[in-house]
Image: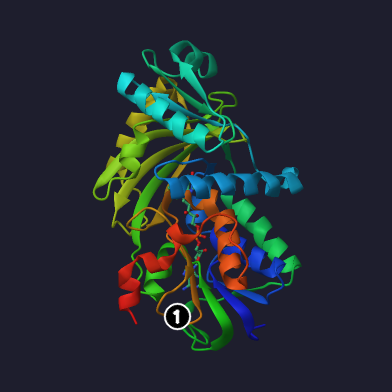
């Protein structure tokens, strides 16, 4: 079982599973090492919103390309995924946020992503349960939602059907020839891909990755309560704060009829406990936009840790100072969306084939501290 591999992938979250699948598809002997449940890390904690994000051109290019890959992937076996092409409505509370909606429309349209501006009447026609007095918004019909742990399992199953193997174990350390497991056993591998989410920095302390904790709540089933993933335009401000904590209105209709309610962001809080005070703030924000939420039954709430990099972009490619070590880390709040594009980029680097989109912006070498490790 623990015989060597061309590539050893650490972590079977959505990113590791996608990388294993693509590397196996390209004919490499892949071994995935996962210490817990497949898709049980941040992948299970996330909301599964597949979203075109446009904070900078590199983020937009990566999300746009990955959304195309998701559509193709789901189309292969739609009944297996818990996928809904519900689209996103970015909700504008006032004139300032309407200006932000127009700017977003310009960015998305220039990238070939269809979207439609909504005035107040059009917004309420789409989502009548929103509070009165909102200004309008922007509808992005190509966005969608999935149930991430299920999609991670589908990716890993496909990887295994292509010859990859899964080993239940914890990696303790990495070197140029493979890894050492917690029990001391060594596994030889030509290359090691570090795809273990926020825990990557525990194996490679030089990585510029910090935990950004998020809370999520799920309700009972209320089919049709809302029809789109609803996100306030102010989300962008709160999502990219570089310190402290923030909440934003972010509500998602699950294909089951349940509602997922987010979102919160807390830097450098690495415990998994629910912070009741922050959860209350998050729910108050959500109920401010959707007053009817306050009457619904909540079933469960949880937290997860996003792996945040300093510039908000993932690290995809070779470690500049560790031979045979490759990174697929730092996906922050977009790793479900960008997992499939990450796998394509990483496999292109490893196999020396042309990258499907310009790859420079995601290269780990952009962080000088990694070079300093040499
Ligand atoms: C609250 C919240 C909401 C989010 N919402 C969204 C969203 O709507 N849309 C979106 O695109 N993204 C979202 N994200 C981000 C997304 O969930 C993550 O970016 C993504 O899941 C990262 O996947 P991963 O495979 O890198 O990490 P993980 O899913 O954390 O997987 C890493 C795996 O590595 C394993 N592992 C760790 N250390 C070791 C070791 N030493 N040896 C062996 N195995 C190890 C872990 O057990 C784990 O299974 C959200 C995240 C959070 C926390």
- State how the image is colored: rainbow
Identity of the residue drawn at 35% across and 73% down? 370
- Left or right, 171 with respect to 27, comes to left
Figure quadrant of residue 314: bottom left
Q: Nearer the viewer, residue 43 or 5?
A: 5
Q: Give the percent coordinates (x, y) of residue 257.
A: 59, 31
Residue drawn at x 38%, y 16% as measured from the top left: 135
Residue at x 66% of width, y 43% of height: 71
Quarter of the figure with residue 294: top left
Q: Which quarter of the rendered picture does the C terminus lie within? A: bottom left
Q: Is residue 336 above or below residue 38?
A: above
Q: Position of residue 197 (x, y in %)?
A: 46, 63
Count of numbered circles in the view: 1
Q: Position of residue 342 (x, y in %)?
A: 54, 58
Q: Is residue 128 visible?
A: no
| Image spot of residue 367 (x, y percent) | 34, 66
| Viewer can see residue 158 | yes
Is residue 12 rendered to the left or right of residue 301?
right
The residue that disc 1 covers is: 172
User: Relative to the observer, which residue lies in front, 322 or 195?
Assistant: 322
Examine the rendered structure and indicate whether residue 304 appears above or below residue 329: above
State the residue in front, 301 or 59: 59
Q: Where does the N terminus fall, quadrant-wise?
A: bottom right
Q: Residue furthest top?
A: 121
Left or right of 121 in this view: 21? right
SS at circle 1: strand
Q: Indicate if the residue with disc 1 has its beta carbon within 8 Å of ligand 1.
A: yes
Answer above or below: position of 369 versus 216.
below
For label 1, the crowd category at 10 Å Cα-Cα, with few meaning under 14, some 14 to 19 and many 20 or more, is: some
Q: Which residue is at a point 75% across and 66% down the rendered structure image?
A: 161
């Amino acid at each position: 079982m623990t015989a060597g591999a061309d590539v050893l992938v650490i972590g079977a979250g959505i990113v590791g599973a996608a990388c294993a699948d693509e590397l196996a598809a390209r004919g490499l002997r892949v071994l995935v090492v996962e210490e817990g449940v497949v898709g049980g890390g941040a992948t299970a904690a996330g909301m599964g919103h597949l979203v075109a994000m446009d904070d900078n051109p590199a983020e937009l290019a990566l999300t746009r390309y990955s959304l195309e890959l998701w559509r193709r992937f789901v189309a292969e076996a739609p009944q297996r995924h818990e996928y809904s092409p519900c689209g996103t409505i970015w909700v504008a509370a006032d004139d300032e946020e309407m200006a932000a909606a127009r700017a977003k429309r310009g960015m998305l349209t220039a990238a070939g992503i269809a979207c439609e501006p909504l005035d107040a009447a059009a917004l309420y026609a789409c989502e009548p349960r929103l509070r009165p007095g909102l200004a309008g918004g922007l509808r992005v019909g190509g966005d969608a939602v999935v149930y991430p742990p299920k999609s991670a399992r589908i990716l890993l199953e496909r990887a295994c059907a292509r010859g990859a193997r899964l080993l239940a174990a914890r990696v303790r350390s990495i070197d140029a020839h493979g890894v050492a497991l917690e029990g001391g056993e060594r596994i030889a591998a030509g290359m090691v891909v570090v795809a273990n989410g926020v825990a990557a920095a525990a194996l490679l302390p030089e990585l510029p990755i910090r935990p950004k904790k998020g809370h999520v709540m799920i309700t009972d089933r209320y089919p049709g309560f809302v029809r789109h993933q609803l996100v306030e335009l102010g989300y962008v401000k709160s999502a990219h704060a570089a310190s402290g904590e923030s909440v934003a209105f972010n509500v998602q209709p699950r294909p089951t009829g349940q509602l997922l309610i987010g979102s919160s962001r807390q830097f450098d809080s690495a415990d998994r406990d629910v912070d009741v005070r922050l959860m209350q703030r998050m729910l108050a924000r959500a109920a401010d936009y959707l007053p009817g939420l306050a009457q619904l039954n909540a079933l469960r709430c949880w937290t997860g840790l996003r792996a945040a990099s300093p510039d908000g972009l993932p690290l995809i490619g070779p470690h500049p100072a560790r031979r045979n070590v490759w990174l697929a880390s730092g996906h922050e709040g977009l790793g479900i969306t960008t997992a499939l594009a990450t796998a394509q980029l990483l496999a292109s680097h490893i196999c020396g084939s042309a990258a499907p989109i310009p790859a420079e912006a995601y290269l780990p070498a952009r962080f000088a501290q990694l070079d300093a490790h040499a």
